[in-house]
Image (cartoon, helix red, strand yellow):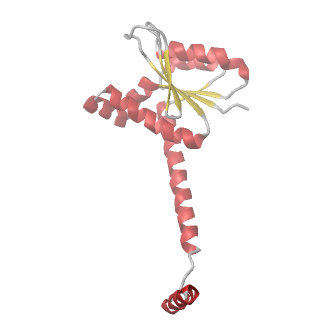
Amino acid sequence: MEKPLLVVDGYNIIGAWPELQRLGKQHGLAAARQQLLETLSNYQKYSEKEIVVVFDAMDAAGPVQKQQERNLMVVFSAENQTADSYIEALIAKIKNQGRQVEVATSDHAEQWTIFSNGALRISARELATAIRMEQSDIRQTAREKHRFLSGNRLQFTSKQLEQLQASFREDDN
């Protein structure tokens, strides 16, 4: 069975997440885009979802550009094509494959098309919450493993260590 698919409306998420909005204003849209991709790449490793991130390329000349970046498929829509229309076409194309598809966008106009093609919509806030929960689970697992490993360390007294060192010296002779 194929992995669930998460399709992310890239610029919509950047516009909805305050930290990415600030980053974009301070360092440019490319910096916000890279931070979004890094965040989604980390999320993908633990969510076991295939993630496609779609950005508008309305003002750029040329066809659709697709590139594998990190563990994500990154798509820039074609000239005169919105990310929304690319996402709609993608979902329509795969709707009969029986694959679970979610679209992350806070564009309410987009949601009806998403629903009519059998996909689920999650808002930018819901995506941020899912990512935070995944990160929290990872930290909790790391803490539990650390506690387990810390509790299972061999404890030697100074005298035992001296005896152990002496036995190694005897073996060398």
Q: Residue 82: where, in percent of width, then height?
A: 46, 12
Q: Residue 26: where, in percent of width, then height?
A: 25, 32
Give me the residue at 66% from left, 33% from top.
Answer: 3
Image position of 173 (left or right of 80): right
Query: In terms of depth relative to the viewer, which is nearer, 61 or 6?
Result: 61
- Residue farthest to the left? 26
Image position of 49 (left or right of 60): right
Give me the residue at 63% from left, 23% from top.
Answer: 119
Q: Residue 90: where, in percent of width, then height?
A: 59, 17
Quarter of the image where one finds residue 22: top left
The answer to whether residue 111 is above or below residue 49 is above
Q: Residue 163: where, in percent of width, then height?
A: 54, 91
**Placement of the C terminus among the 4 image quadrants:** bottom right
**Placement of the N terminus among the 4 image quadrants:** top right
Give me the residue at 44% from left, 6% from top.
Answer: 80
The answer to whether residue 123 is above or below residue 117 is below
Quarter of the image where one finds residue 114: top right
The answer to whether residue 64 is above or below residue 141 is above
Query: In terms of depth relative to the viewer, which is nearer, 75 or 158?
Result: 158
